Amino acid sequence: MANQSYLKALNRALGDEMARDPAVCVFGEDVRSAATNVTAGLLGRFGPQRVLDTPISEQAFTGFATGAALAGLRPLIEYQIPALLFLAFEQIADQAHKVSLMTGGQARVPVTYLVTGSGSREGWAGQHSDHPYSLFAHVGVKTVVPATVRDAYGLLVSAIRDDDPVVLFAPSGAMRRREEVDFAEVAPVPLGVGRVQRPGTQVTVVAIGHLVHDALAVADELAEEISVEVFDPRTVHPFDWSGLAASLERTGRLVVFDDANRSCGIGGEVLATAAEGMRLIAPPRRVTRPDGAVLPFAVQLDRALQPSREQLRAAILASVGSTQLAGAAHG
Amino acid sequence: MANQSYLKALNRALGDEMARDPAVCVFGEDVRSAATNVTAGLLGRFGPQRVLDTPISEQAFTGFATGAALAGLRPLIEYQIPALLFLAFEQIADQAHKVSLMTGGQARVPVTYLVTGSGSREGWAGQHSDHPYSLFAHVGVKTVVPATVRDAYGLLVSAIRDDDPVVLFAPSGAMRRREEVDFAEVAPVPLGVGRVQRPGTQVTVVAIGHLVHDALAVADELAEEISVEVFDPRTVHPFDWSGLAASLERTGRLVVFDDANRSCGIGGEVLATAAEGMRLIAPPRRVTRPDGAVLPFAVQLDRALQPSREQLRAAILASVGSTQLAGAAHG
Amino acid sequence: MPKPASAELNRAELYRTVRLIRRFEERAIELVRSGVIVGGIHPYIGQEAIAAGVCAALRRDDFITSTHRGHGHVLAKGADPARMLAELAGRVTGLNRGRGGSMHAADFAVGILGADAIVGAAAPIAAGAAWASRQAGADRVTAAFFGDGAVNQGVLLETFNLAALWRVPVVFVCENNGFATSTRTGDAVAGTIVGRGAAFGIPASTVDGMDPESVHAATAEAVARARAGDGPSLLECVTYRFDAHHTFEYAARPRYRSAEEVAAARARDPLDIQGARLSEAARARIDAEIEELLARAVLFATGSPHPDPDSALDYLYADGTRTRSAVG
Amino acid sequence: MPKPASAELNRAELYRTVRLIRRFEERAIELVRSGVIVGGIHPYIGQEAIAAGVCAALRRDDFITSTHRGHGHVLAKGADPARMLAELAGRVTGLNRGRGGSMHAADFAVGILGADAIVGAAAPIAAGAAWASRQAGADRVTAAFFGDGAVNQGVLLETFNLAALWRVPVVFVCENNGFATSTRTGDAVAGTIVGRGAAFGIPASTVDGMDPESVHAATAEAVARARAGDGPSLLECVTYRFDAHHTFEYAARPRYRSAEEVAAARARDPLDIQGARLSEAARARIDAEIEELLARAVLFATGSPHPDPDSALDYLYADGTRTRSAVG
Ligand SMILES: Cc1ncc(C[n+]2csc(CCOP(=O)(O)OP(=O)(O)O)c2C)c(N)n1
Ligand SMILES: Cc1ncc(C[n+]2csc(CCOP(=O)(O)OP(=O)(O)O)c2C)c(N)n1
Ligand SMILES: [Mg+2]
Ligand SMILES: [Mg+2]
């Protein structure tokens, strides 16, 4: 066991998979110098034929990876900013995602799209702060958002081994996390399987990515008054609906904590699906970014538009409708 | 009053706005020859300086329109295929949409993005059949999907006059509709205001775009047994939440009919928002495309993945929980 | 430039391919008119020399990517015309099991990675497949077909840069047929098409796209260069679209070009250019053979079953992942 | 080429701008270190001659678009250094009211349409604004700044084509500072940068980006051509980034270039090149004036209020549309 960072987990998972499978290669900007550190050491270990610095041509190198996959490789592409996925959106959503069905199953596109640092980076302003995982869930691209160091390792391994395109969002808010972990003992985390990070009986908080940790902190704060279960879906598409249903069977109350724009986000999808047919004894709630939010530069404004622990706390209390609510409101 | 088509409504609205406001200009592929007929006659009336055939460069001409708007014009861009929005996604979601907030209100981007023929076009296969309006609702771009000939006219006029970027989806499924209408008497339809297309008391069907007409047909079929209200939001972002709440006050039951992928679609958003705080006496339901759907080429498969009247009928019956349900199930 | 095993055989072969494509398109248009093919097609008529000449210079294991106007490429690369026609008719026996249709035919067994409906979008895919082939130690070459309209698409120009930087064994084949739908090439392209390749250091040349043998010769050179590890080439094949942009034009009667202009272009028909190089008898033999082959293809296609609606989500995910269907 | 009203004045003005930018960046870096500026900056140090030379050839009502490394452009075009610094510090008195920050400064009052954090993305916006200005009958010119990395972005190349086709009055200013982050220009660009402009028929030339007067002269020519209706130009200004790609590098100590290489490049410093053209006294007078101006700017910025969190959604929609906030 050693104390490892989330960033190291990604770096280690990528290195382990490259060592295990010669078909795995890496494309991206500054991956040789490892500007983001995700690819640190890979050039030396695997050489320039498997670690390629690309020109600033997101559309072309994203399509290039699709072609390389059709010819038998398993490329991973690193994007330095979530907004870069917008440049490559046609190549991912309209090309890579559609190949398997439209060729009648003749071809597969095992490409991993790794976004290093999604969501707000304080001081980087609106074009560096998007959290667009729900866009990929809507079009149907497999999408994972690891919250923990272990899952960052286990999910990246599974993403690389998956035979379909997979987007992995590594939230800036999780990147600096550290855990005691021995990567050699971490099993791949299957896509589509969530995890109860904290068992509880009164309310289920579904938290996405880095917010899992804030949810756990709030659950601890409230432990005296309320028993909160924290469910981490880990994959936003395909979603672990049975895992969610099982949790709601226990609690009957739902609050989603999602650092993305409100309308048509995964938070709304979780509420909708629960409302359609899962056990709910109180109206479900969500804490998200506002509709259509653009994060302003100034730290005070940037934070004001991200879901907060206070908002989660209030939503949990309101959901449980406990007397603490009045207390919280007045005190 | 004359019998007019949906396509003519778009053509007329655009022509009327160009005549009214010299700042309005049109960019797109084959807009001079009017390949889609939306721009028929405009070159002759307004000349080549206001009707520009573009090279096949979606990213550049989308950004070009943003710049023209910053300098005082009101461009409309026609896209021949919904997937072309994916190519321009960064320029719309990350540039045009973010200008106003990020400049601290110094600038506005009055550009209209018109998609002629969204959703399935039988026989055009997976890359021509997307219905991605929910993606724009998520990022926060104003998005309208007119269902009727009148609304096609009234909403396009409002979109062009709006000071923010607006995407207008003209569904292939609505394009051939005809109505008795005198455009000179049609008032602009404000964005964000829905319309009850058919009043009812037992269940509210929220239908998007061309599906409004299928919903009305199903409501008529069921009229003997069930009183169905059909609510057409007309704008998917910003959504007319008070209009929906008012309808649910009457009916207490909700079924959404949405020709888009299920996860993180506007259908889910409507269910989520209703479940959070509107009157519901039965679990809400939705009829959508499957998760992550890609429409296959063969007509039988293409239709199989689009929401059907039969599915809507079953959902309404299930929602009302009427005895007809058993009847429908067995007969 | 490597000479074909037998010039004679090659001559007949080239004619045969041109003839096959021409008649295939004519039969397909009949099936569009009769409603067997839904959604229409983008006829390749007039451009056959390019598909024929390019693919004659490729090996069976070489790759191609195709376009919305792709029937000719797919037939020339060796796909079964009957299964191709079945695909256009949306049958389970089609190349893509009826999932792709006219704009998306793929046949990995003969190196056809697929046709793309988004202009320019297949170019990086072709380059990536070409690069990966070389990484695997194969001397396979990939040909990427696209139209004159695609040279204005950013992704294509980005791909030129990547291919040149990494000396990717890809041949970029631009079919300049004079129009992007109704827009003339000259109204959309500043500078020249070959100049866009040259700007990235890619050897680029203009070829008579109406003569199968000129196209074959130019392609053979480019292919040899790619196999030798000398990187990409760009061929601008100058041609003319004899028929509609898409069969929907038959109803629309567009005004973007005159009947005289079309008639003048038709004076140089690849079918006659190559046909004139064969004896009457040889030509007649091939024509008859193709009529029979296509007659069988039509019977095969029209006699094949339509897909089962319950299979609509098959292949959505390569690993068989099943997500939620329409009604929850 | 139009001569400036007074060469002397122009000399001093150019030096003044270079000095202003240099010292502004140095003060900004101090504020990054002290935490007043959150998120860091992309220092423009070493490239000042370009912003100074280009903007000296522009009128107040001309437009520019800028980049992630944009402080120099914004200052040279005439934005108030105090309000610029306040923007970097995220204050309500900033150019963008604290909504934009280092990578997004805009000041429409002096023709700064904004800086963009997405490489190449502002080029079509600049071209569109330039085109619209001409439609309105103005002889306004727009300058679009971008780095060497941007010439590999499809949208930039698409924009070259549009600008050339429609003879748009835009000057494309490529600052080739040798690197895109850690990637050398030569490892990312096949062919040449000027060759990419030339391919679209755009007059393109390479300029000494370390000499403000060379940059000014070349820009003046390009601007005159644009005003005369003769369309776009491309200037490749060859320069070198003296400092980090971004201040985060100070912690990372990158290995993509040697200290020797940087030292060698620093031998040609635009500050000295232009300074040597003035008398000691004139130079000292300007230096002192700028120290005082920046001291006031720092006081203004640090003394200005932070925005009210309740105003976070202000300006999201230009027409004041209010949508739902975080907790429903
Ligand atoms: C990126 C993109 N933009 C627009 C379209 C719509 N469209 C289909 S074919 C076509 C013209 C293509 O012209 P060209 O590349 O010359 O090929 P051709 O049709 O002449 O064979 C257009 C604009 C598209 N399919 N893809
Ligand atoms: C389209 C895009 N891809 C990647 C990035 C991440 N990034 C920020 S700056 C930069 C390097 C830009 O190099 P260049 O254009 O030469 O400008 P310079 O930083 O040298 O001034 C990169 C890759 C980005 N901002 N935009
Ligand atoms: Mg063409
Ligand atoms: Mg650079």
Image (tube, coloured by chain):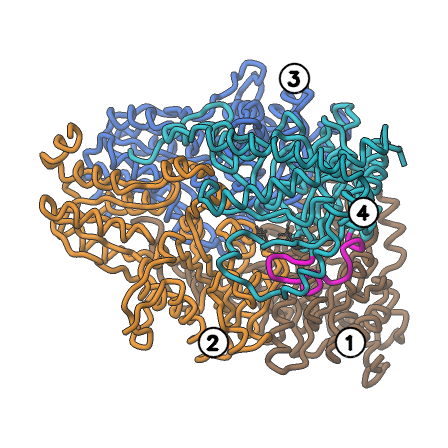
Chain colours: A blue, B orange, C cyan, D brown
Whether residue A32 is situated above or below residue D8 in the rendered picture: above
Q: Which residue is mark 4?
A: D190
Residue at figure coordinates x 18%, y 54% from the top left: B247
Q: Nearer the viewer, residue C125 or A274?
A: C125
Of all residues, the one furthest to the bottom in this rendering is D5
Task: Depth check: give the residue in front, C30 or B100.
Answer: C30
| Label 4 with label 2: CB-CB less than 8 Å | no
Q: Nearer the viewer, mark 2 or mark 1?
A: 2
Q: Which residues are magenta?
A: C178-196
Q: Position of residue A175 (x, y in %)?
A: 55, 35
Q: Which residue is mark 1?
A: D225
Residue annotated with mark 3: A20
Mark 3 and mark 2: Cα distance apart in space: 62 Å
Residue D55 percent across, percent down from the top left: 73, 72
- Residue of label 2: B18
For the point 35% across and 53% down, which residue is it? D325
* Element under disc 3: helix
Query: Where in the figure is residue D301, as x and y percent of width and height?
Result: 58, 65
Separation (CA) of disc 2 from disc 1: 32 Å
Instruction: Say the numbered circle drawn on residue D288.
Output: none
Q: Is residue D292 visible?
A: no
Residue B128 located left or right of residue D273 = left
- Residue drawn at point x = 62 percent, y = 24 percent: A12
Image mark 3: chain: A
Dot 4 or dot 1, earlier in sequence: 4
| Residue A260 within the segment the image draws in magenta | no
Cβ atoms under marks 3 and 2 closer than 8 Å = no
The image position of residue B7, as x and y in percent, is 40, 63
